[in-house]
Image (cartoon, grey):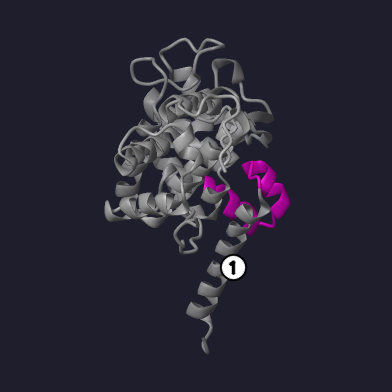
Amino acid sequence: MSLIRDTGASTPALEASARWVDYLATERRFSPASVSAYRRDVLQFLEFLTGHLGGAPTLGDLGVLEPQDLRAYLAHRAEDGLVARSRMRALAAIRAFFQWLERRCGVVNARIKLVRGPRLRATLPRPVSETDARAMLDVAAPENAGWIAARDAAVLTLLYAAGLRISEALSLKGRDRPLPRTLRITGKGGKERIVPILDAARDAVERYAALCPFALDRDAPLFRGARGGELSPRIIQERVAQLRARLSLPESTTPHALRHAFATHLLAYGGDLRVIQELLGHESLSTTQKYADVEAARVFDAYRSAHPRA
């Protein structure tokens, strides 16, 4: 049975979802991209329910939803061409919304937890090779390059040398330079971690700062767009796409592949898995374990291609 405690059963679910999104942004301190993705997934679910139930859903409606209602939504998204991984992400967002509804609004619907997501094929991270990572950084900012090329090279160096997410690198402020030996980073869900900063990363940032035509004030973004505003992640993604084409790199070469490379190359050179977990800010060791699987797969590939009896 459903229980409506803090909010009336007739309260529109859309109104509650807005409060939940605000909670993710302010209390959980999710990144803007994560908040936007969660919001989009839940709004699409509520839009489906409007047609499925014959009217805009209320909290009372959510409290009495059956598993088949949620399965109908997932089937609807599959018919629209949404891949299994995206449907699993949508299901995770809906579950998170219902967990918040239970804690904050008293809407208890245990039946929703019975719905299983689509089966996903196990995938391994696809890091950039050590050679390709070096080539990307060399080509990104050649000698006598302008400030924009130096900026792009500085960001990419932080992704590879410190294992930062692109959002984490772009969240740095003017007060963060010159970069210290260790840097406190706030990652997903507001989780903090300490990462060491190599000389190569500090030097790349200082080279950019020396060339940047804008004043890098303490509270302003460290990395600037062409007109002096906050640098968009899309610009770095486009720059990596250009480097990928120029160097004939695989399609898997993305900014995040440099973070994968950070972990994989540390592991290849004897890094401890638990330490790498801390450096990446992973909640679970099983997430970091995938990098060990990548290295093992490479060893077996080398064996099969080189051993005369393979």
| Viewer-closest of 129 and 125 | 125
* Residue type marked 1: Ala
Relative to 286, residue 258 above or below: above
Can you give x and y, in whole percent of width and height, for residue 79 in the image?
A: 28, 55
| Viewer-closest of 78 and 296 | 78
Image-based side of 196 in relation to 39, left or right: right
| Viewer-closest of 225 and 284 | 284
User: Can residue 177 be seen from the camera position used here?
Assistant: no
Q: Is residue 26 magenta?
A: no
In this view, the residue farthest toward the left is 80
Is the stretch drawn in magenta largely helix, strand or loop? helix
Can you give x and y, in whole percent of width and height, for residue 94 in the image?
A: 48, 42
Relative to 213, residue 76 above or below: below
Specify the segment rendered in magenta: 259-283
Q: Mark 1: which secondary structure?
A: helix
Instruction: Identify the residue under disc 1.
Output: 296
Residue at x-position 49% and y-position 32%: 167
Can you give x and y, in whole percent of width and height, for residue 248 in the image?
A: 32, 54
Residue at x-position 44% and y-position 24%: 15
Image-based side of 200 in relation to 126, left or right: right
